[in-house]
Amino acid sequence: MSLSYLALIVLSMLIGMGATGYVNHELHKYSRVGISNGLTGAEAARQMLAFHHVQGVSVHMGSEGQDFFDPRSNSITLSPSAYNGRTITATATACHEVGHACQYAQGYMPMKARTAIVPVVNFANNAWVWLLLIGIMLNLAQLYNLAIIMYALVVLFAIVTLPVEFNASHRAMDYMGAIALPQSEQSGAFSVLRACALTYVASALISVLQLLWLLGQRNE
């Protein structure tokens, strides 16, 4: 293993661990702070959907750690702590996912672009490592280059994800302001959403660094 790749692994681990530690701290901190309107995350999600006149979106409970909007089924899944919780973390999480549902309903372009490339990215994410290894073992530059192109698609997906996530959080904060939640609770929700956004930034940064390393190896 080259020193440059070892350094890349260590740097990636530090970035990932730092982002994960920060988001876990913020989520835990505000999961102990109640929300003044007394709504569960599921109730908050449904009220935000109604506020924006977004219809046909179901909200249901998944497993712990599952908080996402699925455009294929036009549904929001919330973890039990977010679905049943009456906390700042639960409200922020639920409203963020509703932000994605609003993006989908309103045809938000970055959301449409990300959704459109998901099948290609899923294939590329599974195939690029094998192409890279085969290209190296057989000394085939064409396969190595194809692997880099596929990984570049994965990196592109990570970058396109950033405005989608930022915008969903922005929509959540706008809604919480519109319903006049206390400023302290809005600040707490912003801290939660900012921490979660950092994980996407960290993931994109790690992906870019990996791509730059692969390009550098190709030129050696």
Image (cartoon, rainbow, N blue to C red):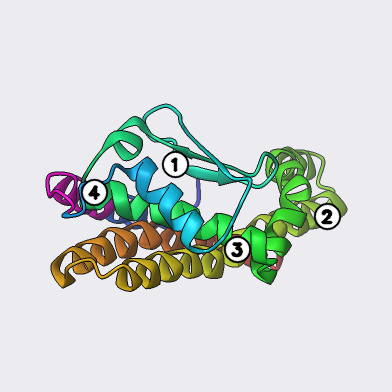
* Quadrant, the C terminus: bottom right
Tell me, yes or no, if residue 4 can be seen here.
Answer: no
Among numbered discs 3 and 2, the one appearing first in the sequence: 3
Q: Between 216 and 172, which is closer to the camera in this rendering?
A: 172
- Picture disc at residue 67: 1
From what the image shows, is residue 16 above or below residue 194?
above
Q: Residue at x 30, y 51 (%)?
A: 91
Number of marks in the rendered image: 4
Badge 2 amino acid: Ala
Is residue 185 part of the magenta span, yes or no? Answer: no
Q: CA distance from mark 4 to mark 1?
A: 13 Å
Badge 3 amino acid: Gln
Q: CA distance from mark 4 to mark 2?
A: 46 Å
- Picture disc at residue 141: 2
In the image, which is nearer the foreground, mark 3 or mark 4? Answer: 3
Among numbered discs 2 and 1, the one appearing first in the sequence: 1
- Picture disc at residue 103: 3
Residue 160 image point, x, y percent: 62, 66
